[in-house]
Every structure is written in C-alpha cells, then in structure tokens.
Image (cartoon, rainbow, N blue to C red):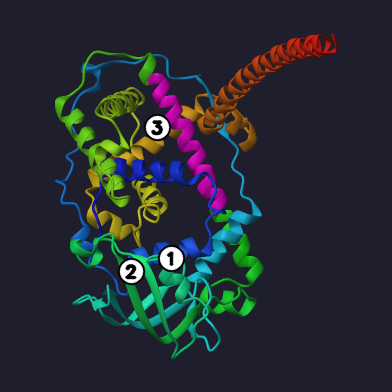
Amino acid sequence: MKKKWTLLGLCLMLALSMAACGSSNTETTAAETVDETEDAEGLDGEEEDEDAEDLDYEPIEVADYDPDDYVKLSEYKGLPVDLQKAEVLDEDVDYEIETVMEEYAEEKDKEGPSEEEDYVVADYTVSVDGKEIPDAAEENKDFYIGFAEFGYEVDEALTGVKVGDKVTAQTELDDMFGEEYEGKTGTFNLTVKRVYTYETPELTDEFAKEKLGAESADAYRESVKESLLQSAQASARSDAGEMLLSQIADESEITGHPDDLYASVEQELTNSYTYYAEMFGAELSDMISDEDLKEAVEDEVNMQMVMKAIIKAEKLELTDEEYQKFLEGAYEDYGYESAEELEADYSREELEVEALRSKVHEFLLANAQVTELTPEEYSAKYDTEEEYEDDEAEDYAEDDDLELEDDGEEIEDAELEVEDDGEAIEDAELEVEDEEE
C-alpha cells in the first residue's frame, strides 16, 4: 500500500530532501545506497509491512472559491526573474547509471575474508556478566559490515572472517534486548555461516541491449544525460515560476482567505513536515516552529489564491493533452510505477490543481523579463548556505581580531614584566654594590 499524500505535500517533501542532500547526488556513496536499500527492505532482506508505517491522514479537499473576493492582482506581466541554466555533469550521469546498474546486482559468495560493505550471515548469542540473555539468540542473521546495527565493535569482529569462524565482541547495549540491559556491556558470540557480497554488472553494449532496451552503452548513456537535462530544465523553470508567484503574492492586495483553503493547506504542510520528522525519529517541533509553520501556510495560501486569480483573469484552461503530459512527467517523482497508479491514489481535481500550477509558471515565464544565469552565478546569488558560511567566516575573522588584540595586551604585559625584571636587576646590582662596600 503506497502512502497517499497531496501533491503539495509531495512537492514539499522533495524540496526538503533536496535541501538536506544538496543540489548534486554525486556525493552519495555506494555504501549509503545499500543502507537506504536495507532501511526500505528491512535488515533481514525482507520487505517490511508498509501499512504499519502509513500515517492515516484524511484526504485533502480542494477548496472552491472566487479569487476576486480576496485578491486584487498586482502587475504580473513583464516582471524580472532569474532562470538557472540547466547543466548535467558527467558525474551526475555516472551516478544515475551506477544506481540503475545496482538494481541488477546479484549475490556472490566469498571464500576469502570479509571486508567492509560485505554481508556476513551468522548465528549469535548475547550474554551479560557471563549469563546469556533470554530470547537474544538468533540464527542466520544478516550483518552488513558498515551498518553497525549492534555497534561498531560487532562489525569490527565480523571483518576479516570466513565461513566457520567463531568470534566474540563486546559492546555497550541499548534497550534492544530490554531496558534492564541498557548501558551494560554485552558479549556477542558469533558463528559465521556465510560471507557474500553483491556484484554489480558492467554497462556493456550487450547489457544495454538485453536489459535496458538501448542500442549500445553509449546510446544509453546519452539517453540518461538527456533525461537528467530535461529534469533539470523542468526544475529550474518551476523554481523561477515559484519566484514569480511569490513576488506577485507579495505585491498584490490580499484582503483575506477562504477558511477551507487555509485549513487544507495547513493540513498538507503539517502532514508533510510530520512525516519528514518521523523519518529521522524527530518531532514536528524539531522540524519547524509553530510561528514558521503559520508563516509557511499563509505564504502558500496567498500564492494559491494569486494563481487562481491569474487563471481566471487569463482564462487559462488545461487540455487533456497537457494533463496527460503532466502525469507522465510527475509519476516517477512521486514514487509511482505509472501514471495510472498515480491517478488511482489522487482525484483528477487534485492533480489538475498541480498541472495548472505548472501552466501558470509557463505563462508567467513567457511574459517575464528572464535573465539566464549559469549554475555558479545562480548559486552565488541565491545559495543561502554559502551566505551563512560567509557570515560565519566574518564572525570568525572578528574573533581572530579580538584574539590578536588580546595577544597584544599579553605582549604589553610581557613588556611590563621585563620592566619589572629590569627593576629587579637594578635592585640586585644595588645589593651587589652594598656587599662590595
């Protein structure tokens, strides 16, 4: 059962993920990819029950209202906006291909010693103070070296082993085996039953033809690059469209909002932030304050009303062709296998709202003064993280100046001490003279 979210909520989830991971995926390692796979499938390699993790939120109703009752539009044509030029690097293509090839990876037993990122199947027991913990024993347990499920000491003990080896490891226990053992030192006794890894195939012309439906490896690589480029272009245009909508909302005269619209947006954002927080074992309050959530809801409500006002003023309508194009471009982003699966979870009315948002983006961009910036120029202008780092650097520089001033005072103190020593020397000379006399 797939989690059902509103499109706005899903968009927010993607935005939060991008903010957390950065603009490039090339920094993700193969080990991180395996960890993510294990999280999704469970540590035993079996699929976890997704229903158990589903959050039972009520479906969001699309609000019905006349935007003219609440919005007096500002000028929305001819506005200046920056558009980031889409660019795909070779490492982006490499990463995407590597991700695809890992889907075809196959298990391969190892005769030699285990290494990091290998899997070790072992029987184990756990004891504390020489007494075995009841119900803590397990047979044929899959350990991924590097995941440190029971602590890095256990991973270290399982590194360099082969079938038949018996090893022990001591580690501090959490409450996994019961609160009475939390914080105590547990001794793991492990018997290795199997060592294996996953072997990822190479992208060859033969593989590209048989498995990927491409004429050759080079042809597949070009198709991946083109797909990433189209995705980057769509993302850049969406960002620019949102900037324009936000600017229009700020400059328009807004006298209120429909209560049901506010309630639906508030529920959408709360659902999304809550789910994102629970992914990291956190609370909603850890993700966003009540004040910031209220501001985010108000901003989104205003943007939705402005969008609807523009649609009405320009008599924009969504054709069946445009709707289908939106579905084809959206379903993969939201984790679906097909456009039909996406439609099965959402009403057409919900989907059309998001499709129309894209159409408003394109209308505004077609009537805007667009300045295209390179990724470097765009990052320099809008990357708040870099600005934050620059501010930090300035703060550190100021601290360094203070430290230098302090050092200066220390130098002055040292000079005073020298003067005192000089006086002491003079006193000593006087004493010597007295002795001579």
Choose between 338 and 325: the one closer to the eye: 338
**Magenta stretch holds residue 354:** no
**What residue is shown with label 1?**
152
Q: For numbered disc 3, what is the local secondary structure?
A: helix
Callout 3 amino acid: Val
Residue sitting at 39 percent across and 32 percent down?
360
First in sequence, mark 3 or 2: give its number.
Answer: 2
The mark found on residue 41 in the picture is: 2
> What residue range appears in magenta?
228-248
Q: Against 163, is 386 above or below?
A: above
The mark found on residue 360 in the picture is: 3
Q: Where residue 292 sits in the image (x, y, percent)?
A: 30, 27
On screen, residue 168 versus residue 284, left or right, reads: right
Residue sitting at 60 percent across and 58 percent down?
93
Are there few (<14), some (14-19), or many (20+) residues within 10 Å of tag 1? some
First in sequence, mark 1 or 3: give its number.
Answer: 1
Q: Quadrant of residue 67?
A: top left
